[in-house]
Image (cartoon, helix red, strand yellow):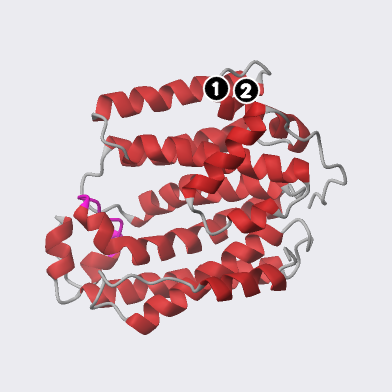
Amino acid sequence: MEGAHPGTGPALSGADAAAMAERVRRSGTSFYAAMRLLPPARRAAMYAIYAFCREVDDIADGPLPRAEKLARLDAWRAEIAAAVQGRPRDPIARALAGPIRAYGLREQDLLAVIDGVGMDAAGWDGPPDLATLHLYAARVAGAVGRLSVRAFGWSGPEADVLADTLGRALQFTNILRDVAEDAGQGRLYLPRELLDLHGVKATAPAAVLRDPSLPAVCADLAAAARFEFAVARRMLARAPRGASRPARLMAAVYMATLDRLERRGWTALDRPVRVPRAVKLWFLVRHGFL
């Protein structure tokens, strides 16, 4: 296992840094407070990673026609290549260029994020099978984790495995939290194997939500998320404490979300579940951000 890198790398300065900070602040992410408390160079790296992920996700979820969404994501693939080569043009790509050099952020991970949101932009032909769901999670969640731990100074095979494991846990939790909202947009991420196991034959999201066996499907996916969280926690016990802080914080917040989802139950999927701000502040203290 590679250890934590001692250097902090050059901090981003000027208009691009201000633009990234404002982009993250306006997003309303509950992790903005944690990012603000980081050392300047690591803060700039996390702002850039978050802004990039938000940018491409907004393209995939936006109102543009499918062909234009895919074209814009292709343009971002070219922009990432330019950032890696040291000649970025877009402000977000310029903000990424420094962390790419300083922390070894990998082009393949940045492209994986684009590939993941591209799966949404292209549209889903019915519920995904488990292999496809795992691929999607590895791209939209695991890749973000792989970028984040590198920005905190931890790299190597074990860091990557942790990021992918925790990514599955987080994405499964997201799916359970947003199942009703996603269905309203014509999307369903519950895996085909679990639907089949419980006799859910429908494939249209609205029809699946009306099926009386849906709570059993959700309970099984929640159990899968719990398993991934348990594996991730065992790995975090061996991880460099400072460099794994973002992973610890994400795990704590999302496990609390899953706890609340299970207490609410799986028959009122349109009732929102939120982790209280006070609990999130406690997690910030507990994991060394305050």
Residue at numbered disc 1: 90
Instruction: Work out whether residue 192 can be spotted.
Output: no
Q: Residue 36's spot in the image, x, y percent? A: 68, 52
Please name the residue shown 77% across and 48% down the image: 153
Q: Residue 274's spot in the image, x, y percent? A: 43, 71
Count of numbered circles in the view: 2
The span shown in magenta is 185-193
Q: Are marks 1 and 2 in contact (CB under 8 Å)?
A: no
Q: Classify 49 as above or below 158.
A: above
Depth order, front residue of 33/223: 33
Kind of residue at badge 1? Asp
- Extreme bottom residue here? 263
Q: Classify 51 as above or below 34.
A: above
Depth order, front residue of 145/161: 145
Please name the residue shown 49% across and 74% down the image: 276
Please tell me whether mark 2 sits on a helix, a strand or a loop.
helix
Mark 1 vs 2, N-terminal side: 2
Say which mark, if any, is on residue 83: 2
